[in-house]
Image (tube, rainbow, N blue to C red):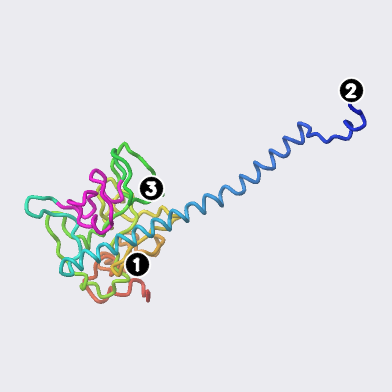
Amino acid sequence: MRKNTTECAGTNRFTLIELLVVIAIIAILAAMLMPALQQARERSRAADCNGKINTLAKSNLLYASDNGDFVSPQWGTFGAKLRYWGNGDRAQGLLTPYVGIHQPKVNIGYCNTYGMSKFACNTFPVDMTRSRASYGYNAFIAGNATQWARRKITRYRRPTLSMFFCDIDSSNGGTVTYENAADNQPFYRHNNYANFGFADGHCKAYALQDIPHMTRGDSKVAAYGNIFWDPVSAVYLDWAKRTE
């Protein structure tokens, strides 16, 4: 039986041009939404990073509580065993047991040929061809790498302003200083902000211009003596007159 041609004539069909227009509109909408989605993803990663550095700061306080108020040194020898603050092995890492991970071949915050640390910044690019650190321990608090540096947490009169850990991007170890080598300075990977964990256990994001920096020409000439690093004089206790 033949179909009614009148009914067929009233049937709606997409033409090729209409289909291309719809595809173009979808592509435009996707292009408009993509930056917002990327920003949302980065905010999520920054928040995750903030939480990890917060945990690192608190782990140092727990370490101090178990060790006569002395914070963890950068590294040193105990008997015949070399210990490092961020070693992924619980038996070797000074802070690893407090963080709650166990990755014997990957230090805290690192990416190397063995993989990515469970405790690394998710914004940090995965590169398993070399060893790089995404988190650094303040070398002025961690002390001299050639010996056990014993510094008490009670040393810090304004712990909310004294930095323990922060974002870095370093192939020169998991420490951070303001020496000339940019490899050991804070790295502002979160939309030009970096996360900083402080001696009271809190973590906050700051931009480069917020941080005392001797070589950048700050009004505080002796930036190394600033409370942000390791104050040696009461004159540096303000950190640009912050009150938090």
Judged left or right of residue 61, residue 25 is right
Where, quadrant-wise, is the C terminus in this rendering?
A: bottom left
Identify which amino acid the numbered label 3 is placed on: Phe
Image position of 75 with respect to 7: above or below: below
* Amino acid at circle 2: Met
Q: Which residue is mark 3?
A: 124
Q: Position of residue 28 (x, y in %)?
A: 66, 44
Q: Which residues are magenta?
A: 83-110
Residue 165 quadrant: bottom left
The answer to if 158 sits in the magenta stretch is no
Residue at 24%, 53% (x, y): give it: 86
SS assignment at label 3: loop
Q: Which residue is mark 2?
A: 1
Judge depth for marks 2 and 3 and give the one in front: 2
Dominant secondary structure (helix, strand or loop) of the stretch shown in magenta: loop
**Which residue is most to the top?**
1
Question: Is 54 in front, or is 144?
Answer: 54
